[in-house]
Image: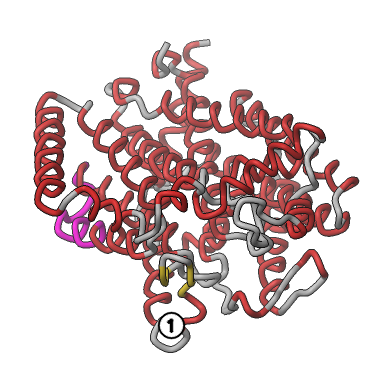
């Protein structure tokens, strides 16, 4: 029995060595087309174009988005149909079971949605995305790529999208800039959301810098690009999420050893000292005005109208616990809502502006509970396999640990920014695809290591 397990383990080792060679960016795209989802694709559309799927108003970009999803999903179906087995470890299957139940609730919500065909179409697109993720996990489970290289390719994708934003900005600023009460924001529009892609650039660059995975000068430059780009959006949600994610990354890095812990504590203390000096010299009120974009306290407390929308969804679901209908329900039902506090229409808010509230409005309290359980299980699995001591005796798995640890930081960034943004729950959105790609990486590595653990059970933490 032990000899059979060792043979299985050695087979996985050889496969890992075969696929650890350098693979170009374009070969990665051909081998793992799920990476194409990270591009979006870029959509050259302004808010004034009035494209609204709930009313059946579509444009050429809508068909390109759907076509990309259908193309990658068809490939995933074909590869799974030709596969001798589509089974993955039960821990991963359990998470997918929750995802399928959530998808089923979304599909059921189409029966009471204000626009049944559109809600059903979105639910089908959610299912097709799950198929793409499952096929990627199955592929990584059997023959893993160089997953650290995969993260570098993700950063390259984000960098290319950011360059595209900068190139288009002087010629078509209305595609990229958004006007708010606080001023103009460099949001990226539908081409490439700056807050998302720059956050990814900053996190991956910070991780490679701390762990010396590339030239530190290059990592530092790219980190500053991502950091400045994120703060150029003037989005408090993205800024807070990035600070939280970087703090978590610093804490995990400090756990490596005594020297890194000393550096982390010293750096954190220096930051607190400098920040205190800045408050004393510039004044707390001035700094608060800069952080709040010159808005008043009431605007901050109301989260620019979001709190009223959240209260509306919660009150609605208290009397109708099944929700409003997937995606479309909130858009149509909330359009007629008028703010009682300001006396102004809030119909310009097209979604719940919170991933968690959006899930609640989509299919009710049960869907929100399943979504939260699914996220908790994914994070627990990532924390389990990001444990450095787990792989101290297995150097060939160190790249897996680093990849899953960096992916966990990015997932934390998505979850944190998702508190004030609903795009992570809306199919065809770039946010939605990026979160699924990171989840696929975490689950793919976890499936791979669970398979290896059958040969050497001591590899897993108790």
In the figure, residue 217 lies in which quadrant? bottom left
Please state if 25 lies on the left or on the right of 108 as rendered: left
Q: Is residue 219 magenta?
A: yes
Q: Residue at x 45, y 14 (%)?
A: 457
Q: Residue at x 56, y 53 (%)?
A: 305
Can the viewer see residue 428? no
Residue at the farthest right position = 111
Tag 1, which secondary structure? helix
Q: Residue at x 49, y 41 (%)?
A: 415
Q: What main secondary structure does the magenta stretch of the protein show? A: helix
Q: Judge by depth and name the residue closer to the eye, 227 or 223.
A: 227
User: Which residues, given as a range, are shown in magenta?
Assistant: 211-223
Q: How many marks?
A: 1
Q: Residue at x 19, y 56 (%)?
A: 220
* Residue 284: percent from left, percent from top: 21, 48
Residue 316 lies, with reference to residue 48, above or below; the image says above
Q: How is the image coloured?
A: secondary structure
Please state if 443 lies on the left or on the right of 398 as rendered: right
Can the viewer see residue 227? yes
* Residue 40: percent from left, percent from top: 56, 65
Residue corresponding to mark 1: 168
Dot 1 crowding, Cα within 10 Å, few <14, some 14–19, many 20+ = some
Q: Is residue 339 magenta?
A: no
Residue 232 lies, with reference to residue 445, above or below; the image says below
Q: Judge by depth and name the residue closer to the eye, 277 or 15.
A: 277
Quadrant of the rendering where the C terminus is positioned: top left
* Residue 143: percent from left, percent from top: 51, 42
* Residue 410: percent from left, percent from top: 41, 45
In the figure, residue 200 lies in which quadrant? bottom left
């Amino acid at each position: 029995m032990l000899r059979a397990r060792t043979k299985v383990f050695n087979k996985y080792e050889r496969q890992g060595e075969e696929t650890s060679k350098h693979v170009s960016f374009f070969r990665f795209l051909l081998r793992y087309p799920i990476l194409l989802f990270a591009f979006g694709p870029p959509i050259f559309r302004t808010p004034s174009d009035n494209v609204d799927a709930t009313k059946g108003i579509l444009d050429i970009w809508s068909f390109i988005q759907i076509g990309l999803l259908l193309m990658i999903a068809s490939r995933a179906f074909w590869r799974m149909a030709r596969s001798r087995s589509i089974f993955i470890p039960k821990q991963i299957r359990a998470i997918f079971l929750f995802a399928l139940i959530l998808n089923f609730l979304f599909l059921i919500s189409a029966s009471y949605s204000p626009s049944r065909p559109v809600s059903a179409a979105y639910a089908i697109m959610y299912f097709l995305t799950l198929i793409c993720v499952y096929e990627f996990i199955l592929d990584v489970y059997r023959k893993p790529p160089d997953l650290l290289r995969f993260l570098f390719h993700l950063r390259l994708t984000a960098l290319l999208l950011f360059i595209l934003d900068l190139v288009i900005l002087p010629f078509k600023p209305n595609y990229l800039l958004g006007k708010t009460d606080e001023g103009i924001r460099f949001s990226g529009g539908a081409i490439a959301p700056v807050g998302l892609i720059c956050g990814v650039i900053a996190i991956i660059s910070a991780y490679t810098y701390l762990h010396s995975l590339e030239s530190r000068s290059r990592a530092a430059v790219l980190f500053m690009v991502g950091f400045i780009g994120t703060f150029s959006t003037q989005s408090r949600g993205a800024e807070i999420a990035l600070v939280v994610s970087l703090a978590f990354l610093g804490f995990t890095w400090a756990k490596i050893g005594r020297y890194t812990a000393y550096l982390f504590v010293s750096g954190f203390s220096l930051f607190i000292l400098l920040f205190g000096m800045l408050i004393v010299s510039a004044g707390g009120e001035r700094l608060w005005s800069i952080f709040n974009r010159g808005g008043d306290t009431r605007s901050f407390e109301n989260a620019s109208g979001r709190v009223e929308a959240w209260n509306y969804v919660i009150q609605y679901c208290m009397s109708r616990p099944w929700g409003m209908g997937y995606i479309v329900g909130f858009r149509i039902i909330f359009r007629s809502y008028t703010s009682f506090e300001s006396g102004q229409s809030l119909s310009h808010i097209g979604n719940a502006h919170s991933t968690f509230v959006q899930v609640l409005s989509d299919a009710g309290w049960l869907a929100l509970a399943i979504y939260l359980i699914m996220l908790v299980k994914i994070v627990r699995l990532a924390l389990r396999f990001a444990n450095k001591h787990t792989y101290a005796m297995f150097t060939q798995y160190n790249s897996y640990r680093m990849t899953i640890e960096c992916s966990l930081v990015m997932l934390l960034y998505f979850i944190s920014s998702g508190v004030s943004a609903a795009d992570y729950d809306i199919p065809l959105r770039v946010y939605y695809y990026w979160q699924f790609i990171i989840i696929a990486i975490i689950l793919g590595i976890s499936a791979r290591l669970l398979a290896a653990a059958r040969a050497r059970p001591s590899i897993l933490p108790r």
